[in-house]
Structures are given as structure tokens and as C-alpha cells.
Amino acid sequence: GAHHVRSSRSSSGDATGASALLIADAGGQPCPGSGTGWKCLGTLTDKGEVLDGKVCKVSCNGTNSTPKVKEEVCKNGDYNTTPTCSGTTCARPVSLVLAAAFWCLAANILTDM
């Protein structure tokens, strides 16, 4: 009897496994592919979204800004942490330029600790 059990494992078992994975993928909500001051590099959907389970390589729009977390994984419509860029505030034209510069310096010192 034991021999029959082993022979019943055919290649069709692999096929159903693969399609089940696809269905599970489709169930998750996509994540936004861009936000305030940042965007994702890599594979985006036609709508510019990151699929559930895929990685968003965070890219900052500001020249001097860097992402706090370089890679975010999309989990059913949400990232582990919302992608943020440090230094984006410095790129905005502010009337109180000096105050903004000091604020940026203070913020950078804080984030580096």
C-alpha cells in the first residue's frame, strides 16, 4: 500500500501549488509607489503602485535628502514604516532661510544619533 501513496505525487501537484500562490498574491492590497518627497524605484504596476509582498526601494526627490529606511516591504497596502526622507525640509524654499537651515542642522544631528 505504501508504494501507491508515493506514486500518486504527480507534476499536477506542483501546478496547483503555483496557482494557489498567485491567488494569495492577488488578495493583498498594493501600496502607493510614491508620497511626499519620495518615490519607489523598481517594479511598479500600471498605476504606479507596489504590489503586496514586493519591495519598494525608496528614492528621495530632494537632491540632498536620503531615505531613513532604504527598502520597505509592502504588506497588504501598508509599509512596515511609512517611507520618509531626511533633509527634504531643507529643499523647500522658506522665507526664514536661516531658521530653516538651523532646523535642518538640528534635525540631522538628531537623526544621526
Image (cartoon, rainbow, N blue to C red):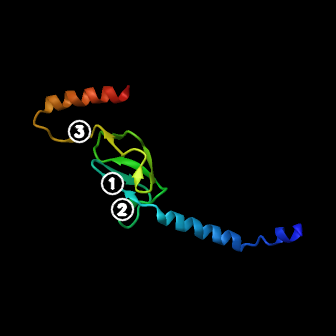
Please state, as top left, top right, bottom left or bottom right, where the N terminus lies in the image: bottom right
SS of the residue at dot 1?
strand
Q: Amino acid at mark 3?
A: Thr
Compared to residue 16, the image places residue 103 above or below, namely: above
Asked if residue 10 lies left or right of residue 105, the reply is right
Quadrant housing residue 110: top left
Position of residue 85 measured from the top left corner of the image (x, y, whole percent): 32, 41
Seen at 11% across and 33% down, the residue is 96
Q: Amino acid at mark 2?
A: Gly
Q: How many marks?
A: 3
Seen at 22% across and 37% down, the residue is 90
Q: Amino acid at mark 1?
A: Ser
Position of residue 112 measured from the top left corner of the image (x, y, whole percent): 37, 28
Asked if residue 109 lies left or right of residue 20, the reply is left
Which mark sits nearer the N-terminus, 1 or 3?
1
Quadrant housing residue 84: top left
For the residues labelled 2 and 3, the Cα–Cα distance comes to 25 Å
Identify the residue under disc 2: 48
Please state, as top left, top right, bottom left or bottom right, where the C terminus lies in the image: top left
Residue 34, numbered label: 1
Label 3: few (<14), some (14–19) or many (≥20) C-alpha neighbours in 10 Å: some
Identify the residue under disc 3: 89
For the residues labelled 1 and 3, the Cα–Cα distance comes to 17 Å
Compared to residue 69, the image places residue 34 above or below, namely: below
Seen at 35% across and 40% down, the residue is 66
Compared to residue 60, the image places residue 16 above or below, namely: below
Tag 2 and tag 1, C-beta contact below 8 Å: yes
Label 2: few (<14), some (14–19) or many (≥20) C-alpha neighbours in 10 Å: some
For the residues labelled 2 and 1, the Cα–Cα distance comes to 8 Å
Position of residue 79 measured from the top left corner of the image (x, y, whole percent): 41, 49
